[in-house]
Each structure stands twice: as structure tokens, then as C-alpha cells.
Image (spheres, rainbow, N blue to C red):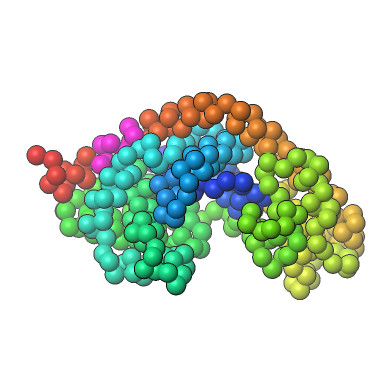
Amino acid sequence: MTNMRVVSGIKPTGNLHLGNYLGAVKQWVAMQDQILSQGGETMYFIADLHGLTEWIAPADLRANTIEMTATLVAAGIDPERSILFNQARVPQHSELSCLLNNVARVGWLNRMTQFKDKAGKNREGASVGLYDYPVLMAADVLLYNATHVPVGEDQKQHLELARDIATKFNADYETELFTLPAPLVSQAAPRIMSLRDAGAKMSKSNPSEQSVVKLIDSDEVIADKFRRAKTDPDLLPETWEELGSRPEARNLVTIFAALADRTTAEVVAEYAGKGFGQFKPALADLAVAKLGPIRDEMTRLLADQGAIDAILERGAERARELAAPLLRRAQEAMGLLV
């Protein structure tokens, strides 16, 4: 499909961990290789503007953006083949968002469930940016006439909003300017849980260092965390379904399968009848083999932040070249250019 253009963004967060990698970054790399092999285009951006919706220290935001870029490149995103940039370097994102705010309806935004979830009981104290960020998300993809956008369950509503905004703009201004992006359903991202409590997601905010495997961890630390991961005394069964009531076991098998690019059923079948005294060392070795090279490349890249800056600027230049003509056409359609 030669006209396929995939656009996706990720907020810059620091101290990335195994859950972030398996849930998002690894998926992006697989998507890049698949789409490019079909003759399409892939654009990935660090959503630093979205990072402003809740207060963050400027130095932290800059550091997180650099770290996220290094992580993506180290994991396999190729800035020579994909367009990789951060939002703030492409002002057309903000400009188109401003225009689309006059097309989006308040009622549409009031139905966005993520704002309700993130604002909680303090809706009156939430920033306008948090309330309005689905419109910026729409601008992010409509700006490049993206044909497909990767979405998880929690983002489907936002893509539907982007399509509604595009449809209304095209109708209001009697144009076919905006492509209606379609959802791109990739392999289901695994839900990675804490190594100490499989009832909670793996998170950097967990006070227990043993609960989370960070991408920057040394080989020794990675191995130690898996060897000490919470399990149960029973042997692994013959089928995945038999692990239904064993959350810690399910979590470790899920991690093994995701790292090895295998199904959970295959992993269980291989280790059926064996205990975690055998399984956890094998998982530790696999994690070190997969994560160690990414950590080493991240470390190398972070030692030369000028090189990372150059990657982002080259990507932003390519993105601006694509964005500028569409923004101008939107301004012309709205009567802003005379």
C-alpha cells in the first residue's frame, strides 16, 4: 500500500521500564518495519506539547524528551527511514490545533472519558490544555493526512473525535482537505505487571525497586530482579488456561513470551512440569539478552546529546516540509489568507 502513512506520538516520560518497552516502543519498531516494507511511511513524534497538560519542571521535560528519543533509536526506530521529531519543533501542530478548536464542539469534548479520568474530582482545577488535548491530538494526525493511526483501547475515542473534526471541517468549508484516519490495530500489547505484586501495573512510581525493571538497569540488576520476582510454589501447567488463578505466574510467562516473540501457550508448553527455580533464571537470561543491547545503545546516545538534538532537528525539518502546505490550505479554506 504505497500511500499508507502512519503517524503516532508518545509522551516523554523519564525512567522508562520494561512495561513501557513491551507495551509501546517494541510495538512501534515492529510497525515501522512492517509499514515500510509495504512501501508506506512512518512518522513518530515525542509529544512534548502534550507533556505540558500537567505541570512538569522545564528541565525534566527537556531531559525526558532527550531520553525518550534515545530509547526509541536504541530500540530500533531508524531516523533515516522513519520521520522522528518532537512536537515543539513543528509549530504547525499548535497552529492547526488553534484552527480546529473552532470546529470541534464543546459537547464532543465533554464526552471524552480520559479527561474525566485524569482530572478526577478536581475538574475545575485542571488545565484547559488537559481538557482540550484531544483537539491537539487530532491536529497531530490531520496535519500530515495520516491514513492510519495506531490506537489502543483507551485512544479509540480520540481517533473518532479526529475523524469527526475532519468531517465537519471538510463539510463546513466545502473541501476535501483532511483525510479521515483509520485505526491501525497492531499486535495486542501485553499488560506488564509489577514483579512484586501482579495485581498492579509495573510503574516507576512504585516504592519497591524490585517491582520494576528499568531499561537503564545493568545486566546484574535485571537478572536479580527476575530471580527474586514473586511467584508461587506450584509447577507450570501444560496449558496457558490453567494459569488463570495464578497472577504472578501469568505475568512472568507474559513477559517471557513478549521478549521472545512467542505466544504464551508456546512458553507454557515448553516449561510444563518445571518449577520457577528453572523458569526464572531462563527468563532472567532472556531479559538480559534483549534489554542489555538497548541499554548500551541508550547510554552511548545519551553521552552525545548534540547528536540526539540533530536527529530531532532533521526529523522536524522533514515534518515541517510536509505540514506547511496543509496548514496553508486550511488557512485558505477558512479565509485567513488574503
Query: Going 65% across and 32% down the picture, which residue do you hit?
Result: 299
Residue 106 found in image quarter: bottom left
Q: State the predominant SS element of the stretch in magenta.
A: helix
Would you say 67 lies left or right of 93 here? right
**Horizontal and vertical percent for residue 204?**
64, 54
Residue toward you, 289 or 228: 228
In the rendered image, is residue 204 in sight?
A: yes
Residue toward you, 162 or 241: 162
**Horizontal and vertical percent for residue 121?**
44, 72
Quadrant into which the C terminus falls: top left
From this viewpoint, which residue is outermost toward the left? 338
Query: Going 33% across and 65% down the picture, which residue do you hit?
Result: 109
Would you say 108 lies left or right of 149 here? left
In the rendered image, residue 321 lying in the magenta stretch gets the answer yes
Specify start and end residues of the magenta stretch as a single range.
Answer: 320-327
Query: Going 37% across and 59% down the picture, which residue do you hit?
Result: 127
In the rendered image, residue 236 lying in the magenta stretch gets the answer no
- The correct choice, above or below, for 22 with respect to 105 in the image is above
Residue toward you, 295 or 159: 295
**Horizontal and vertical percent for residue 98?**
26, 50
**Horizontal and vertical percent for residue 50?**
42, 50
Quadrant into which the N terminus falls: top left
Would you say 206 lies left or right of 36 here? right
Residue 132 found in image quarter: bottom left
Query: Going 48% across and 52% down the picture, which residue do you hit?
Result: 150
Q: How many marks?
A: 0
- The correct choice, above or below, for 237 with respect to 35 in the image is below
In the rendered image, is residue 9 in sight?
A: no
